[in-house]
Image: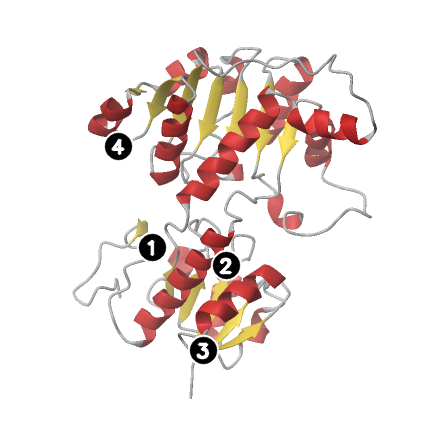
Amino acid sequence: MSETIVFYDAKPYDRRFFDLVNQEHGYAIRYVDAHLTPETVALAEGARCVCAFVNDDCGQEVIDGLADRGVELVALRSAGYNHVDLEAAYERIHVVRVPAYSPHAVAEHTVALLLSLCRKIHKAFYRTRDANFAIDGLLGFDLVGKRAGVIGTGKIGRLVAEILRGFGMEVLVYDIKPDQDWAAGIDARYVELADIYRQCRVISLHCPLTPQTHHLIDAAALETMGDDTVLINTGRGGLVDTAALVEVLRTGAIGAAALDVYEEESQYFFEDFSSQVISDDILARLIGFPNVLITSHQGFFTAEALEAIARTTLGNVDAYFANEALDNEVCYRCDGPCDKGERGRCF
């Protein structure tokens, strides 16, 4: 009998691509519309594997509930794992992730946000729909010759840097593990964070969310930016102190912001609240700024990326049930991606 996977927070697009790829695997996927929470953990009864997404609750209470019900594997269909209590899961439940699916998707969305902001495409769209063809108030700026800062030079950050170099921008980059050969190859330059904050017209965030990067962009960092700076975050919401961002936007201390992620997004993103009042005051204020562009964590949302996510996720499940090495495991002992034990697992 095939193994059962309980799939939380299942959207129609998830079902489409997982059903397609699962034809090659043959799992019994039990789709659940609800998020994984302490209240819904009981729906995992009888399964050895659950599939969770970025806004599912994988804290200690949920981990305890899963373990009590015999769940052995949490298969994340995301790269990020900051929502998982790895300490609670260690030596009880294995956690695997999708470290890369389509870095091009997120990189291209990042640049789309930048272009929309710097040429006010989003505002022009609504004007012309109302037959208003005036261009006063839509003055933009050229990217060529401007200086961009890319924070985090993993797969996505590198692609963003390369695209921006293609626009003729000067690119400064930062990473805790700089790759000087790559930077030299595209004529970019590694600098300190403070240099990016002070010198760059465009700043784009592409680093993971860790205790060290939480609120990397805080009030102090924002105060050093210019009043024409465009800040883009397609990484993780917690990289930016959103309350501090609202304040500098209110006073005009920075030029604009584009956010595909938000600190408290789990309550709103991926859901339809169009007929309801947004009770999150900070999010409501952000939406109201004319120089802020928000998308609902859709940077990854391409057909190519969704198929890749499904293939990697089910491949991780295959490896677990075949007792093979878990190349994409994350755990508490390794404080993130595993450095592998004798059997290719950390426990």
Report x, y in % for residue 230.
54, 20
Q: Amino acid at mark 2?
A: Cys
Residue identified by numbered label 4: 177
Q: Is 193 placed left or right of 292 in the picture?
A: left
Q: Secondary structure at mark 1?
A: loop
Q: Quadrant of the C terminus?
A: bottom left
Observer-nearest of 30 and 107: 107
Residue identified by numbered label 2: 58
Q: Residue at x 74, y 12 (%)?
A: 136
Observer-nearest of 144 and 331: 144
Q: Nearer the viewer, mark 4 or mark 1?
A: 4
| Disc on res. 332 | 1
Disc 4/disc 1 C-alpha distance (Å): 22 Å
Q: Residue at x 40, y 36 (%)?
A: 207
Q: Earlier in the sequence, mark 3 or mark 2?
A: 3
Q: Nearer the viewer, mark 3 or mark 2?
A: 3
Q: Is 165 placed left or right of 11 in the picture?
A: left
Q: Earlier in the sequence, mark 1 or mark 2?
A: 2
Residue 156 vertical position relative to residue 200 in the rendered view, above or below? below
Q: Earlier in the sequence, mark 4 or mark 1?
A: 4
Q: Amino acid at mark 3?
A: Tyr
Q: Amino acid at mark 1?
A: Tyr
Circles 1 and 2: CB distance less than 8 Å? Answer: no
Q: Callout 2: 10 Å neighbours few (<14), some, many (20+)?
A: many
What is the count of numbered marks? 4
Q: Nearer the viewer, mark 3 or mark 1?
A: 3
Residue identified by numbered label 3: 27
Q: Callout 4: 10 Å neighbours few (<14), some, many (20+)?
A: few
